[in-house]
């Protein structure tokens, strides 16, 4: 999966705080355990580790989507590397409802407000989503990028 580059000075307007009954906002420190647990159980514990780092920043570098008092998505930034966005995850039932786009744009606008002109989306999965929502462009020869050689939960068997 390649890395993507986003021009923060050319973003569409920031989303509204409510999108289809879902509140998009910066996470609060007392919510850390809930967001980390949700990221690990819904996606994977590597993403949860990145979310933990995002909570160590001030302001917290993680936006969440909340519907009826429950998390339905998150987007972290500056977790693995400076100026990197991700991970971003949305519950399966909330996909296609613009929640992912609202989370993405909220985090990218926060990065712009912190002084960045560009953002890197590391190891982006669905590149078409990032291209459509934020005008992201693939960085050539960027796969596997910084994640090369990363330890995995299920290492290959020793021979």
Image (cartoon, grey):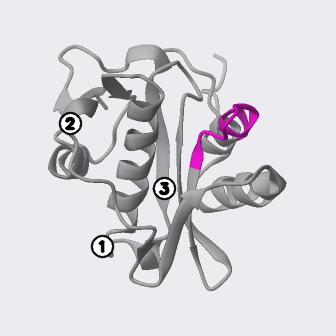
Q: Does the magenta stretch include residue 66?
A: no
Q: Name the residue under label 2.
A: 136
Q: Name the residue under label 3.
A: 89
- Vertical relation: 81 (above or below) 88: above
- Specify the quadrant of the image occupied by residue 154: top right
Alpha carbon separation for disc pair 1 and 2: 19 Å
- Residues packed near mark 2 inside 10 Å, few (<14), some (14 to 19) or many (20 plus): many
Q: Is residue 56 magenta?
A: yes
- Where does the magenta region start and end? 52-62
Q: Where is residue 69 in the image (x, y as percent from the top left)?
A: 68, 80
In the image, taking residue 78 as reference, residue 144 lies left or right, namely left
- Indicate the quadrant containing the C terminus: top left, top right, bottom left or bottom right: top right
* Residue name at image x 35 percent, y 27 percent: 119
Alpha carbon separation for disc pair 3 and 2: 17 Å
Alpha carbon separation for disc pair 3 and 1: 12 Å
* Residue name at image x 65 percent, y 42 percent: 51
- Vertical relation: 119 (above or below) 41: above
Select label 1 or label 2 by which is in front: 2
* Residue name at image x 60 percent, y 27 percent: 156
- Residues packed near mark 1 inside 10 Å, few (<14), some (14 to 19) or many (20 plus): few
Q: Where is residue 125 in the image (x, y as percent from the top left)?
A: 33, 43
Q: Mark 1 points at which residue?
A: 96
Under circle 2, the secondary element is loop
Q: Which of 15 and 36 is in front in this view?
A: 15
In the image, taking residue 25 as reference, residue 108 lies left or right, namely left
Q: Are marks 3 and 2 in contact (CB under 8 Å)?
A: no
Q: Where is residue 30 in the image (x, y as percent from the top left)?
A: 84, 55
- Specify the quadrant of the image occupied by residue 45: top right
- Vertical relation: 74 (above or below) 65: above
In the image, taking residue 3 as reference, residue 141 lies left or right, namely left
């Amino acid at each position: 999966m390649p890395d993507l580059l986003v021009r923060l000075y050319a973003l569409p307007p920031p989303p509204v705080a409510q999108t289809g009954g879902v509140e998009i906002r910066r996470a609060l420190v007392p919510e850390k355990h809930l967001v980390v647990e949700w990221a690990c159980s819904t996606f994977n514990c590597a993403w949860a580790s990145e979310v933990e780092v995002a909570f160590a920043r001030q302001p917290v570098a993680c936006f969440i989507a909340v519907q009826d008092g429950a998390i339905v998505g998150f987007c972290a930034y500056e977790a693995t590397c400076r100026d990197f966005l991700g991970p971003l995850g949305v519950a399966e039932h909330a996909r296609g409802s613009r929640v992912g786009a609202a989370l993405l744009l909220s985090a990218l606008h926060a990065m712009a407000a912190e002084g960045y002109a560009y953002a890197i989306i590391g190891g982006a999965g669905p590149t078409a989503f990032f291209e459509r929502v934020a005008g992201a462009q693939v960085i050539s020869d960027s796969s596997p990028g910084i994640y090369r050689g990363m330890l995995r939960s299920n290492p290959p068997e020793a021979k």
